[in-house]
Structure formats: C-alpha cells, structure tokens
C-alpha cells in the first residue's frame, strides 16, 4: 500500500481522473491518504480524515511511508482555526497560506513536517468557539466540493465547523445524517445541532448548523443565516421556503 500527504494549501479531488471532471471534495494541507489506484498521472485516493474518495493529480502531494501515515492517522491532529495561516517553507523561504481546517503534522515549537518539507507556522489568533468559527464563514461563496472560506458546500461547512469541536463528520450530508442522535422536536434544537433537508424523492441533499431553535447558518449560494421552522428554511430574499426539513441530529 502507498500513502501520501497533502503538501499544498488546497488540492481538488475529482470524480474522474482528469482536470475537467467534477470536484467532489478537497484535500487540505497536512491531510493524509491511501493511494488505491494509479491511472496515467492521476491517483485514486481515500482521505484518512473522512474516508472520502476521489482522484488526485500526481503533482499535488508528497509521499510518506506506512509508519508516518499511521502516526498521523491515529493521533488527533492539530488544525488551523484562522482564515489563512502563513507557513514559511524552510530551504527556499516561500510562504504557503494554509486555509482554515488545515492539519499541522508533527507540530513542535511552531514547526511542521509534510513529507520531506518543513515549515514554520504561527497559530496565534485561532478562534475556538463554535459560534465564532461558524460566523467567520458568513458570506463565503458556495462551491461544490469546497471546504474552505474561499468556497465551501453545505456539508463541507458542517464538517469544518464541527471538526473544531471534536466531532468527526463524514463528507456528504446524507452520510452525516447517519451519525449523531435524533432531536425529536425542532423546539428542542440548540446551538451545534445539525438540521438535514430532503428533496422531493426523499433524498437528503442539504445540511445546516442550528444556532437555536429558530435560526440556522448554512451554505446556499453563500454561507448565511436564515429562519427555520417545522416546514424548513425560509429565505426572505426569495420570499419562499428553499429547503424542506427532514431531521435534526445532535453530536455534542
């Protein structure tokens, strides 16, 4: 088995082994993965963090051995909690700006290691509370497969915020809905609960984070706050309900 680590700020995972294919998710700096298959200059990988699978270009990672992979996969990682954290690369003094949620592998005295590269980082200024972190994403644009302030989808938003609270969510909304405990009534919803919404076929297609039992923050066009009731999310700018409530789950 071969293993790798993301050594770029963001690397897209594609549905097929070509640049024109749909972006299904992203690897953030420091995340590790198994290499399952090679096709031309593409790798089919599985992200160790959430088990998500996609195709990665072979120029967008660094190789690591099995021992390093196991150490990084088994330990609870330290992640960045600011909009962008500067990482100074030793050797050529270049800077990589690590997005929110990047992993800091082998962090020790401000230094991290990704493959055979060493960086110096400054983690001061991190925000910690769920509310602060969720609010920091407001107005971030919606991006299918996105996981950062520069572009994020609904399940990526839920995953990113809850990760900072020690909750490991899977990647897609329907997968996340299989985790957690059911909240029986909307009136009982509290900060940090996740609300899930389905389409006309009954398939869960959207998720948001409850702020209380009347308001929700979610990624739809952009990350924003809307009212929610038993029917679903009401968007005043569209003057209609945009998402039909299916279930509420609790993880904290």
Image: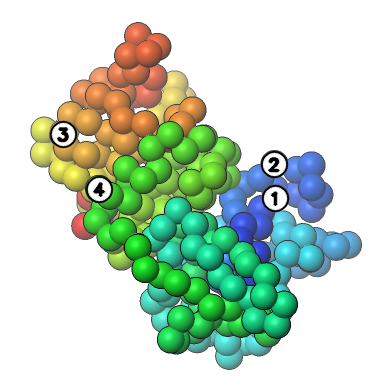
Q: Secondary structure at mark 2?
A: loop
Instruction: Name the image colouring.
Output: rainbow
Q: Is residue 200 visible?
A: yes
Q: Quadrant of residue 129?
A: bottom left
Q: Which residue is mark 1?
A: 14
At x 25%, y 48%, the residue is 131
Q: Secondary structure at mark 1?
A: strand
At x 79%, y 42%, the residue is 20
User: In 3D space, how far apart are the residues under numbered discs 4 and 1 (Cα atoms)?
Assistant: 31 Å
Tally the marks.
4
User: In 3D space, how far apart are the residues under numbered discs 1 and 2 (Cα atoms)?
Assistant: 6 Å
Is 140 in front, or is 219? 140
Q: Position of residue 167 (x, y in %)?
A: 32, 61
Q: Position of residue 5 (x, y in %)?
A: 63, 73
User: In 3D space, how far apart are the residues under numbered discs 4 and 3 (Cα atoms)?
Assistant: 15 Å
Labels 4 and 1: the sequence-earlier one: 1
177 vs 56, left or right, is: left
Labels 1 and 2: the sequence-earlier one: 1
Quadrant in the picture for the N terminus: bottom right
Q: Secondary structure at mark 4?
A: helix
Q: Which residue is mark 3?
A: 213
Q: Is residue 150 above or below residue 242?
A: below
Q: Which residue is mark 2?
A: 22
Q: Quadrant of residue 215?
A: top left
Labels 1 and 3: the sequence-earlier one: 1
Q: Answer few, some or many: residues within 10 Å of disc 3's Cα (few below 14, many 20 plus, some between 14 and 19).
A: some
Q: Which residue is mark 4?
A: 131
Q: Is residue 158 above or below residue 122?
A: above
Q: Is residue 169 above or below residue 32?
A: above
Labels 3 and 2: the sequence-earlier one: 2
């Amino acid at each position: 088995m071969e293993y790798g680590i993301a050594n770029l700020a963001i690397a897209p995972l594609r549905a097929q082994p070509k640049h024109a294919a749909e972006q299904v998710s992203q690897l953030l700096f420091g995340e590790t993965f198994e290499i399952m298959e090679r096709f031309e200059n593409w790798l089919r990988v599985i992200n160790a963090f959430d088990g998500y699978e996609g195709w990665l270009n072979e120029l967008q990672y660094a190789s690591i051995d099995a021992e390093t992979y196991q150490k990084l996969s088994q330990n609870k990682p330290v992640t960045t909690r600011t909009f962008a954290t500067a990482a100074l690369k030793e050797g050529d003094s270049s800077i990589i700006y690590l997005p929110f949620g990047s992993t800091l592998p082998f962090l020790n005295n401000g230094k991290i290691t990704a493959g055979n590269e060493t960086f110096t980082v400054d983690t001061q200024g991190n925000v910690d509370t769920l509310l602060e972190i969720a609010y920091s994403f407001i107005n971030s644009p919606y991006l299918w497969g996105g996981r950062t302030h520069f572009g994020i989808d609904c399940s990526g938003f839920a995953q990113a915020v809850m990760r900072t609270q020690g909750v490991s969510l899977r990647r897609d909304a329907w997968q996340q809905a299989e985790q957690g405990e059911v909240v029986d009534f909307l009136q009982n919803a509290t900060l940090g609960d996740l609300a899930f919404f389905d389409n006309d076929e009954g398939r869960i297609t959207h998720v948001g984070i409850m702020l209380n039992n009347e308001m929700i923050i979610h990624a739809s066009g952009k990350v924003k706050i809307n009212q929610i009731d038993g029917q679903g999310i009401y968007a005043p700018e569209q003057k209609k309900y945009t998402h039909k409530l299916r279930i509420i789950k609790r993880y904290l």
